[in-house]
């Protein structure tokens, strides 16, 4: 790939999505963007870059961003955050939110929907305790293609075999041809919405629990700080934030601090989750 083309695309992606690409990752551009070039009847990446550089074709730019920000996920990824959610955070909020009887959860960068649906299944299993409560799950992603997939609730055999307990597969999925269809009741528990983490999230409202896992690793320090500071403003003082196992707030921002003894769980810098 030509140096000027790499610089064009990397600058575009940083501005549009926060994604930071080092030069040793140029192979990702070639792998993921050739299908975009073919879709728009272009001969290759050089022609694709010329369309971006000269025409500023928004459809092409949107497809480039989508292709580069589609990330892998799986049901109940890493297990521990979901155990903490079920065993500690939800019971804690059931005590603290007695007056409002409302809990709001945000899954940022939800990809194909496995994370929010994992939370929905946990809540469904706890439905007796949640009777009379309004629990909302908001799931967002920059990729419209991923959101459409998530809304469909259709997963391949490979996808349901990764992390999903067989008991929940049998209980909440039905085979549909060579794929598995998630129960409509579980799907209705999640509201999907397009959202770019580079934007101010104020319009989404306040959340008691935020999952923003395995997203910050793609950003530079300034972008990480901006995202975390914005998220902190959307949470009450006893709100909880989950990050990925390779992510941390330390050395990035004072808006959050780790919850002692709860790896991957963070609380506001001026707050206390209380677990």
Image (cartoon, helix red, strand yellow):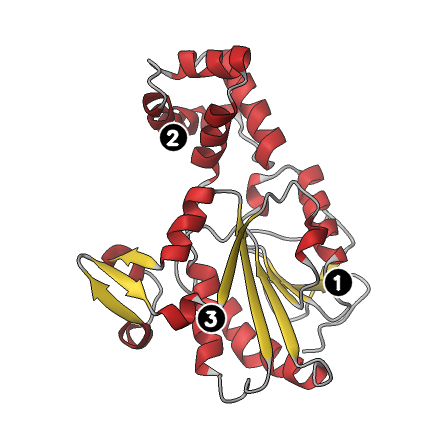
> Viewed as shown, does residue 110 lie left or right of 230?
left
Q: CA distance from mark 3 to mark 2?
A: 31 Å
Let me know if residue 175 appears in the view. yes
Q: Quadrant of residue 264?
A: bottom right
Closer to the chain start, of discs 3 and 2, is 2
> Viewed as shown, does residue 133 lie left or right of 174?
right
Q: According to the image, label 1 marks what residue?
A: 268
> Viewed as shown, does residue 107 lie left or right of 75?
right
Q: Which mark is residue 32?
A: 2
Which residue: 53% across, 30% down?
21
Decide which of 191, 253 is in the foreground and name it.
Answer: 191
- At mark 1, the secondary structure is strand
Percent position of residue 255, x then y:
77, 55
Q: Which mark is residue 120?
A: 3
Percent position of residue 96, x then y:
71, 82
In the image, farthest residue toward the right: 270
- At mark 3, the secondary structure is helix
Compared with 26, 98 (above or below) is below
Is label 2 or label 1 in front? 2
Percent position of residue 240, x then y:
66, 67
Mark 3 Cα within 10 Å, few/some/many (few <14, many 20+)?
many
Closer to the chain start, of discs 3 and 1, is 3
């Amino acid at each position: 790939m030509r140096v000027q083309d790499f610089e064009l695309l990397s600058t575009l992606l940083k501005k549009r999505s926060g994604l930071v690409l080092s030069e040793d990752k140029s192979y990702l551009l070639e792998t993921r963007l050739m299908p975009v070039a073919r879709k728009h009847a272009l001969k290759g990446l050089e022609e694709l870059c010329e369309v971006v550089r000269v025409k500023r074709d928004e459809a092409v730019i949107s497809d480039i961003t989508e292709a580069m920000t589609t990330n892998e996920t799986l049901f109940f990824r890493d297990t521990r955050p979901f155990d903490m959610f079920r065993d500690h955070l939800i019971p804690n909020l059931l005590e603290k939110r007695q007056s409002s009887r409302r809990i709001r959860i945000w899954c940022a960068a939800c990809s194909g929907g496995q994370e929010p649906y994992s939370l929905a299944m946990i809540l469904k299993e706890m439905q007796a305790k949640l009777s009379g409560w309004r629990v909302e799950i908001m799931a967002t992603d920059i990729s419209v293609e991923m959101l459409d997939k998530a809304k469909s609730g259709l997963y391949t055999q490979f996808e349901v075999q990764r992390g999903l307990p067989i008991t929940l597969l049998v209980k909440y999925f039905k085979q549909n041809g060579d794929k598995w269809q998630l129960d409509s009741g579980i799907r209705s528990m999640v509201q999907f919405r397009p959202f770019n983490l580079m934007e101010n999230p104020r319009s989404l409202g306040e959340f008691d629990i935020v999952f923003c896992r395995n997203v910050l690793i793609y950003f530079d320090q300034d972008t990480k700080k901006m995202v975390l500071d914005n998220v902190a403003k959307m949470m009450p003082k006893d709100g909880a934030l989950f990050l990925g196992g390779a992510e941390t707030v330390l050395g990035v921002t004072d808006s959050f601090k780790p919850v002692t003894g709860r790896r991957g769980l963070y609380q506001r810098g001026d707050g206390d989750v209380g677990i």
